[in-house]
Amino acid sequence: MTAYLNALGIVCSLGRGPKDVAQHLFAGDCSGMQQTDGWIPERPVAVAQVQGELPAIPAHLARHNSRNNQLLLEAALQIGDDIEQAIQTYGRDRIAVVLGTSTSGIDEACHGIAHYAQHQHFPSDYDYRQQELSAPAEFLAAWLNISGPTYVISTACTSSARALMSAQRLLRMNVCDVVLCGGVDSLCTLTLNGFAALEAVADERCNPFSVNRRGINIGEGAALFLMSKQASGAQPIALLGAGASSDAHHISAPEPSGRGAVNAMQQALQRAGLQASQIGYLNLHGTATQHNDAMESQAVAQVFPHGVPCSSTKPMTGHTLGAAGALEAAFCWLSLSHGNALPPHLWDGQPDPQLPALNWVTPGLTLAPEHPRCLMSNSFAFGGNNVSLIIGDAP
């Protein structure tokens, strides 16, 4: 069953809305990555923060008030007309919500606990439910007054990629007619200090696949698709295939040979009915850590022995953790809907001689004209959790 991706709301350090984000993405704009104090004690680090005011959570939903939900609301408002049309067409009980997150409202919880430690009571606007992992989906369903299946998947950095897989499964099972699916994560001190404790955070802009790579940057953002059984528009885009694996090699380090990553990519190709040679672009997980880039290089070289144009977009957006899978699938969607442009690979140009050479997207490179156009996006997470998605022209 084809799962059509009929509309996209998106916000990240590159901008707000598909047009704005696409303009900066394909130009290789890293200006949203800023070195900032205050996240990690006595150490400035580069983070990719969404700038400017975010929409306010409505007063009657005050218990849902968190930056995470504000980012999600920003994305949802962008596709408000499409959502309303779906509600009118199918009914409120046939619209589902499936999201991925890793932070939820934990930043508000941290501030609430700090206030309690100082004053022996929580601030008046604190609500424990802000930090529950289910919070983003519950908020979106409450805001829209819809009653289809509503849940959050939290598998670290594959969360929202798995949300898209789960959404497609709901449609296939005829549990609903439309799914609002994607992911959202917001910056918070707990996350940044956790990764710093793992010695995985770079002070400067990350440098994926370079011999000089020193670790990740953290970012924030939201991407929300309207996935449906029915296509809309003259050139419909779909989730063509998806694959997942869990090699369970280590709690935080990836399996070195890339066995699980290879399995996920091969599953996605099989389910899409495609050969590796038909993939026109691969958005790499590309975190710029020593272990991830080594593993992913090995895996890509195995699945694509003749090469594939690829890039990591994390120097522009940072690693948005639970939102990364949906955000980077959205970048593939933008390539298809914005003139076949591709995001360039931004690094210092100094390859690691220990890694297989990959085919990097250079500025101005576009998708080959073959049809159907098919793009892959990789997401890898702690615990050996691996997901690959294939986005392309609907059959």
Image (cartoon, rainbow, N blue to C red):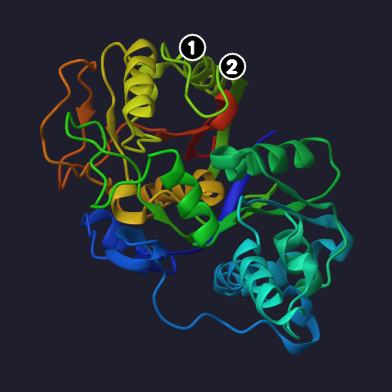
Camera sees residue 237: yes
What mark, if any, has residue 259 been given in the picture? 1
Drawn side of residue 46 relative to residue 192, left or right: left
- Badge 2: residue crowd in 10 Å (few <14, some 14–19, many ≥20): some
At numbered mark 1, what does the secondary structure look like: helix, strand or loop? helix
User: Which residue is the site of mark 2?
Assistant: 247
Query: What is the x, y in percent for residue 146?
Result: 83, 66
Q: Residue at x 29, y 24 (%)?
A: 308
Quadrant in which the N terminus is drawn: top right
Proximity of marks 1 and 2: CB atoms separated by less than 8 Å: yes
Q: On screen, 306 above or below 319?
A: above
In space, the residues marked 1 and 2 are separated at their CA atoms by 8 Å
Q: Quadrant of residue 348?
A: top left
Camera sees residue 236: no
- Which of disc 2 and disc 1 is earlier in sequence? 2
Query: What is the x, y in percent for residue 357?
Result: 20, 19
